């Protein structure tokens, strides 16, 4: 375990939060999308976070350390939200349209949490380089 | 062991610097996984290890397999913090606690590295015949 591993751990956290921000922006952009390649409304996406040990054979401390990676993007499978809107081009015979089941409020809260988590990881990254520089100055 | 770089203060400070760096990595790992469902925050119990480092006057000798060795990372006790009952996804990382630990740890790291620098400055002073 060395200082590079610490950088890598924080980098994995930053990358994971960035993917989370991307899925949120995709969800918000498509909150009213009724047509997709597979037919039907857009489905909400959410990343799946997974802790992965950085060194399973090292010392006890090394085994306790984990970086985070995205093991996949979960795509919702629900039917969507049925809204009565006969004037909509995608309305069915009874005048109902299927919209994506996306709650804007939920996405905004998720957005704020993701950006705070991103900041926390960036903060650790800064501190790591500060400590590394500090160590290089020993004896000066 | 003798030699001017193997004195208790110098090697003690070196070990503490090592420990602080390990604590820093652990905090990085906890914060990276602050949103991973089911992840348990890890912590090192510092007070025991620190008192061990200085009780044995810096040169850690292993007298028992379970004791601290020359490398603390091999035998370090890692605590796994349990998630509180109200935690929805079983994650036990408290970002505030980790951030506070990050700041405290980086302050202590600076203090120890300054200590090491001062110790080296003293040796330099002596080696230069008392001339600065």
Image (cartoon, coloured by chain):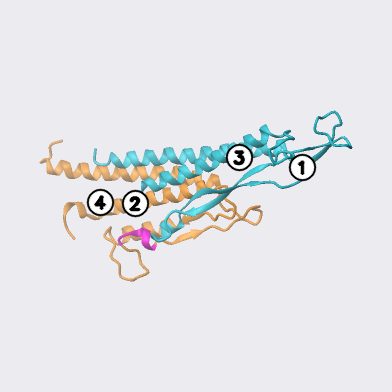
Residue that lies at the very extreme toward the top in this rendered image: A87
- Kindly report the distance in space between the C-alpha atoms of the residues bearing marks 1 and 3: 25 Å
The image shows residue B104 at horizontal and vertical percentages of 44, 44
The image shows residue B108 at horizontal and vertical percentages of 38, 45
- Kindly report the distance in space between the C-alpha atoms of the residues bearing marks 4 and 2: 12 Å
Q: Main secondary structure of the magenta part?
A: helix
Marks 1 and 3 belong to one chain = yes
Characterize the local packing of mark 4: few (<14), some (14-19) or many (20 or more) Cα atoms within 10 angstroms. some
**Left or right of residue B121, residue A67 in this image:** right
Q: Chain of mark 1?
A: A
Marks 4 and 2 belong to one chain = yes
- Chain for colour cyan: A
Local SS, label 1? loop
Q: Which residue is mark 2?
A: B18
Marks 4 and 3 belong to one chain = no
Q: Chain of mark 3?
A: A
Stretch of the chain drawn in magenta: B70-75
Q: In which quadrant of the rendered image does the C terminus of chain B lie?
A: top left
- Kindly report the distance in space between the C-alpha atoms of the residues bearing marks 3 and 2: 33 Å
Characterize the local packing of mark 1: few (<14), some (14-19) or many (20 or more) Cα atoms within 10 angstroms. some
């Amino acid at each position: 375990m060395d200082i590079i591993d610490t950088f890598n751990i924080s980098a994995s956290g930053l990358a994971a939060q960035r993917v989370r921000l991307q899925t949120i922006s995709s969800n918000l952009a498509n909150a009213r999308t009724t047509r997709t390649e597979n037919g039907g409304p857009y489905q909400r996406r959410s990343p799946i976070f997974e802790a992965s040990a950085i060194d399973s054979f090292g010392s006890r401390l090394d085994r306790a350390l984990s970086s985070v990676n995205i093991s996949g993007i979960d795509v919702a499978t629900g039917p969507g939200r049925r809204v009565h809107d006969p004037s909509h081009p995608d309305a069915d015979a009874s005048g109902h349209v299927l919209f994506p089941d996306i709650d804007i409020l939920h996405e905004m809260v998720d957005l704020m949490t993701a950006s705070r988590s991103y900041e926390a990881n960036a903060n650790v990254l800064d501190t790591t380089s500060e400590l590394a520089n500090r160590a290089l100055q020993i004896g000066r | 062991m003798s030699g001017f770089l193997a004195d208790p203060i110098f090697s003690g400070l070196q070990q503490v610097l090592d420990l602080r760096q390990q604590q820093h990595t652990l905090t990085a790992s906890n914060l990276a996984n602050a949103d991973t469902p089911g992840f348990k925050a890890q912590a090192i119990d510092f007070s025991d290890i620190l008192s061990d480092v200085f009780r044995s006057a810096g040169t850690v000798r292993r007298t028992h397999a379970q004791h601290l060795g020359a490398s603390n990372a091999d035998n370090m006790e890692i605590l796994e913090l349990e998630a509180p009952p109200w935690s929805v996804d079983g994650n036990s990382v408290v970002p505030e606690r980790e951030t506070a630990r990050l700041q405290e740890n980086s302050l202590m790291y600076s203090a120890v590295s300054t200590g090491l620098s001062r110790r080296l400055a003293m040796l330099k002073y002596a080696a230069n015949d008392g001339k600065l």
